[in-house]
Image (cartoon, rainbow, N blue to C red):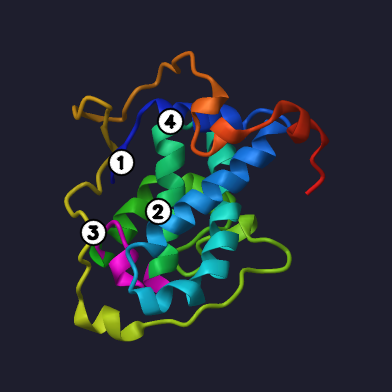
Amino acid sequence: MKIRQNVRHWAAKKALTTPVVGEFANRKLVDLHTRIFLGKADEARQEERREHLDAFFDATMDAYVAALEAGYTEAQAREVTHIQANFDFFNHGWTEMMEIPAGELEDHYRRYEEFFKHYDVTIDDPLGAFAPVSGVPEAPTTPEKLEEGEFENAVAGFADDVYVEDAAGQMSVGGDTEEPDVDVRDAPGMGEYDDDEGANADD
């Protein structure tokens, strides 16, 4: 899959894996991902998918941290969550939100098969063991989109590895593995984080 990697991604990793701060960062990243992917959907479909995506992306944050703990790089761990999301989009027929074409889903699964099997993740069950106990809110499907076969935002040809575009626009396989010195406030939404409020947050 083709993804980007810059200071904000490294800061998000640091924020998510830092006690207390992680909960705040999690909410901000969920909001960001929901907003980005809803932006790819027809306006008439956006609100009916919001609760589903919020819950789904919240669960993938746990998958991201688990992948890091399993030894995957930052780029690989993030790719894992994007693959899970594409499984979910495919199952719902939300082809306009997919980043990879349907024909490459199996290839992406196989690359992380060991991790996915460990957590019972499949194409049909994208969250596996990461699914919340209460489940993920249902949202209407659009199976007709699959029949039409249009994946207007999908980028094909990157199924064999994680291809990473850095801040300078340079592409590499695997991305950076050396974590730079970053501030958690550089992560999306963290600029408004208040240390005192965060330390006392109970929501």
Q: CA distance from mark 4 to mark 2?
A: 20 Å
SS for tag 1? strand
Q: Residues within 10 Å of mark 3 (few under 14, many from 20)?
A: some
Q: Residues within 10 Å of mark 2 (few under 14, many from 20)?
A: many
Q: Secondary structure at mark 3?
A: loop
Q: Which residue is mark 4?
A: 8
Q: Is residue 77 magenta?
A: no
Nearer the observer: mark 4 or 2; the answer is 4
Tag 2: amino acid:
Ile
The range drawn in magenta is: 90-101
In whole angstroms, how far apart are the C-alphas of marks 1 and 4? 13 Å
Residue 3 circle label = 1
Expressed as whole percent of the image width and height from the top left, the position of residue 71 reads: 52, 29
Residue 36 x/y as whole percent = 39, 55
Secondary structure, mark 4, is helix
- Disc 1 residue type? Ile
Q: Answer whether residue 71 is visible to the viewer in this image.
A: no
**For the residues carrying marks 3 and 2, which lies nearer the camera in this image?**
3
Q: Nearer the viewer, mark 4 or mark 3?
A: 4
Q: Is residue 11 above or below residue 26?
A: above
Residue 154 circle label: 3
